[in-house]
Structure formats: structure tokens, C-alpha cells
């Protein structure tokens, strides 16, 4: 279990993030068109997984905008924005913002992605949502960078994530 904060108040996650150097566990997540994708659908691509509680908060929206702008410019790289938001909300947000360089994926059905990767928030007002995390994978699905943001209201370290691409 990891301890992070929300507004300075301690909250806990369901476990520890996967370790750098290990393979990312397979997943099934829902795209904005309601189709289901898995890790194998992105085989051969570098992946930036921008994981957050909800696209309807300022910090989460800022991270989607930033990764849309910067990480998607990296060669052979796909940015996956993962939350428990409904796919309709993800699609609405990116459509309204004109963001088309990210792939929105929802873990709304059972939260299994958050549980498997130790990033589900267990207590506090955001219990059941995902904590703010960035995981970067190489072309082989090996984890080359992780960050769990210690204060959920803060933005991730974009430079550190982009530096490994």
C-alpha cells in the first residue's frame, strides 16, 4: 500500500506501482467508441500511460493537454490517458479541447487496471478512483519509468517521463 495525499491529507492506494524493468501486466480498457483494447493492441509502440482520477478536474485536464502536446510528438509513441471516467466524458473533453494526439481509455467497468497496478485509491473522498500516475513503456512493453504523484492535486513530472522516450 502506498500513501499519498489529497489536499495535504493522507490517503492510501491499493498497492505499489509495478517496478521499472518489469513487463507491464496486460489490461482490458474501454475506448471512447466503447470498443475494448488490451496492451497487445499497442505492440511495438512506446507508451506513456497518463493515469488520473478524472478528466473533469483541472490538474487531470492539464496533464492530458500537456501529454497531447509533448509526448505525442515523440517518435513511435502513443499516449494513453486512463481514468475511471465514462468513455463519453473522455470523448467530450478531448473533442471540446481539440485534443487528438492521445488515446482515452476507461477502467469504469470494474477498476481492474487500478487494482492490478496498485494505484486504486482506497480511502478519502476519491476512493475507487485512480491515483495520479505516469508509467512509460518501451516498444516491448517493459516499464522504463514510473511516477506516483505524492500530492494528487499536483501535476506529474513531465520532463522525467519524456526524458526516457
Image (cartoon, rainbow, N blue to C red):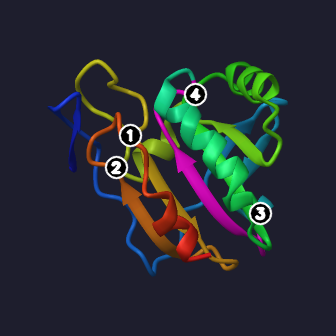
Under circle 1, the secondary element is loop
Crowd tier of the residue under label 2, counting other residues whose Cα lies within 10 Å: few below 14, some 14–19, many 20 or above: some
The segment highlighted magenta reads: 42-55
Q: Earlier in the sequence, mark 4 or mark 1?
A: 4
Q: Are marks 3 and 4 in contact (CB under 8 Å)?
A: no
For the residues labelled 1 and 3, the Cα–Cα distance comes to 25 Å
Q: Are marks 1 and 2 in contact (CB under 8 Å)?
A: yes
Camera-near label (1 vs 2) is 2
Under circle 2, the secondary element is loop
Under circle 4, the secondary element is loop
Camera-near label (3 vs 2) is 3
Mark 4 lies on residue: 55
Mark 3 lies on residue: 73
For the residues labelled 3 and 2, the Cα–Cα distance comes to 23 Å
Mark 1 lies on residue: 131
For the residues labelled 2 and 4, the Cα–Cα distance comes to 16 Å
Image quarter (top left, top right, bottom left or bottom right) of the C terminus: bottom right
Under circle 3, the secondary element is helix
Q: Residue at x 55, y 42 (%)?
A: 63
For the residues labelled 4 and 1, the Cα–Cα distance comes to 12 Å
Crowd tier of the residue under label 3, counting other residues whose Cα lies within 10 Å: few below 14, some 14–19, many 20 or above: few
Mark 2 lies on residue: 149
Amino acid at each position: 500500500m502506498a500513501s499519498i495525499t489529497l489536499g495535504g491529507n493522507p490517503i492510501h492506494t491499493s498497492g505499489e506501482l509495478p517496478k521499472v524493468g518489469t513487463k507491464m501486466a496486460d489490461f482490458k480498457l474501454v475506448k471512447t467508441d466503447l470498443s475494448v483494447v488490451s496492451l497487445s493492441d499497442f505492440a511495438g509502440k512506446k507508451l506513456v500511460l497518463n493515469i488520473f482520477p478524472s478528466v473533469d478536474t483541472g490538474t487531470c485536464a492539464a496533464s492530458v493537454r500537456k501529454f497531447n502536446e509533448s509526448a505525442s510528438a515523440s517518435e513511435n509513441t502513443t499516449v494513453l490517458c486512463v481514468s475511471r471516467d465514462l468513455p463519453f466524458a473522455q470523448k467530450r473533453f478531448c473533442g471540446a479541447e481539440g485534443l487528438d494526439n492521445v488515446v482515452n481509455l476507461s477502467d469504469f467497468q470494474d477498476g481492474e487496471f487500478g487494482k492490478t497496478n496498485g494505484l486504486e485509491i482506497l480511502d478519502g473522498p476519491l476512493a475507487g478512483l485512480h491515483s495520479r500516475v505516469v508509467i512509460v513503456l518501451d516498444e516491448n512493453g517493459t516499464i522504463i519509468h514510473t511516477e506516483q504523484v505524492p500530492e494528487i492535486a499536483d501535476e506529474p513530472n513531465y520532463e522525467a517521463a519524456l526524458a526516457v522516450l
